Image (cartoon, grey):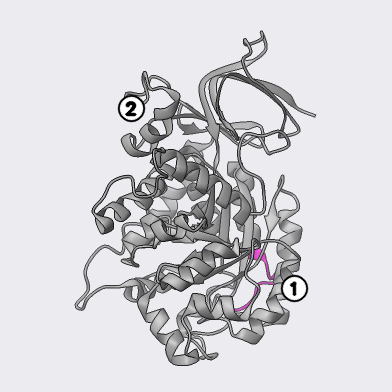
Amino acid sequence: MSRSHLWFDRALLSHGWAHGVRLKIEGGRIISIAADTLPEADDERHAIGVPGMPNLHSHAFQRVIAGLTERRGPNADSFWSWREQMYRLQGRIGPDELKIIASLAYMEMLEAGFTRVGEFHYLHHDQAGQAFADPAEMSAMICAAADTTGIGLTLLPVFYAHSGFGGQTPTAGQARFIHDISGFSRLLESARRHAAHLPDAVVGIAPHSLRAVTGDELNALIPLAEGAPIHIHIAEQTREVEDCLAHSGQRPVEWLLNHLTVDAQWCLVHATHMTQDETLRLARSKAVAGLCPITEANLGDGIFPAADYLKHGGRFGIGSDSNVLISMVEELRMLEYPQRLHHRARNVLATSGGSTGERLFSGALSGGGQALGTGAGLAVGHSADIVSLKARHPSLAGKGDKDVIDSLIFATSTGAIDCVWRHGRKWVSDGRHATRDAITDDYARLMERLLS
């Protein structure tokens, strides 16, 4: 069993910053932590250590359309017009293409400080909408990309059955996503077999949304999770809220909370459009709000009521969603900045006298770990998912403990991350993934072929 020792001049532990920190790693997990120590001869030494961040919501295949949907159409563009463009482009992606695209996205996540991804995966069938001989063939490619890059994986196969509230017939663009309960159960069984070969992989489920899944289907799906995480898109768009009200007389978050036991097993992705009552009830439910600020801004979704939600103890995590730009620090920064614009104030999400960056970082770390079914943070027993920072980066040089995370989030964009360990193995050195050249070469050739 592999064993190693890392020593940090300072590291962010579960109780705060500590100095002279020595981590002993065995079998991919942290088995001991000592502070106020001097490095030993066989220790690998680094300046600043922080926990790897969970990325709780990704559609890996959408990385391929980044930058291709930024031209205005003849009418006002919206999430719904973007979705039609996404439907057209996904028709070109088969299993081999998916592995290449997901490998690039996961490599970029690791370089950005994300060490585990929640893959909300709904591209299941072939280009004609027919199931593969192995119903989880595309899920197997997601697992292969995670294995190639080293990222931790929480695989969330998506159940998608309808095009709108009330069980509406799916559209042609949704043919690759569609299942009934029995078919989805078979896919889930196969996906679990593929994921079993990865270290500390988790397989949950993801009912796509209330517009794509009926109430009866939701009740049939929940037992299939077998206690693992359940993720759902909800209340991302105002039209979705209006359609839900027209169909049921209730708003999406309101309907979910009224009809199901929503608790710590659940992650409600986006939950952008909530009333004060919905915000309070979600905060008290112990579920996680899955926030994807870069994608939500890119798609014009709206602004999550973060100030009220956090005031009532709400749990949250961050995700890269459409992967239009993969950046851990930018997701956290974009969570705070729209709040400042909306409230016309500064440090909106900080507690009184506290650090904004540390509240964002610690909240996303804890909520992301919960939502992905694992622990997160530098603690004994946890996977050794660790990020080292460059102490001499211009925005970090000379900064004391109380300013490091604020400076990382609000004063850096790239270049501050040095090394990244995932399950005890160092995959990123000097900001570059170990297989970056091969992955980017494969991706460049794929894009030249897809766009020719």
Residue 304 lies in magenta, yes or no? no
Q: Residues within 10 Å of mark 1 (few under 14, many from 20)?
A: few
Q: Residue at x 48, y 72 (%)?
A: 278
Relative depth, front residue between 189 and 258: 258
Relative depth, front residue between 25 and 360: 360
- SS class, disc 2: loop
1 and 2 marks in contact (CB < 8 Å): no
Task: Give the magenta-colored segment's residue range.
Answer: 129-137
Answer yes or no: is residue 452 visible. Answer: no
Q: Residue at x 64, y 77 (%)?
A: 260
Residue 30 placement (x, y as % from top left) = 70, 31
Q: Is residue 220 above or below residue 428?
A: below
Residue 441 placement (x, y as % from top left) = 45, 43
The residue that mark 1 highlights is 223
Q: CA distance from mark 1 to mark 2?
A: 48 Å
Instruction: Give the mark nearer the N terminus: 1 vs 2.
Output: 1
Quarter assignment of residue 264: bottom right
Number of the label disc, if any, that sits on residue 395: 2
Q: Residue at x 57, y 58 (%)?
A: 119
Relative depth, front residue between 292 and 63: 292
Horizontal placement of 301 versus 231: left or right? Answer: left
Q: Which residue reaches farthest right?
A: 1
Quarter assignment of residue 71: bottom left
Magenta segment main secondary structure: loop
Q: Which residue reaches farthest front?
A: 352
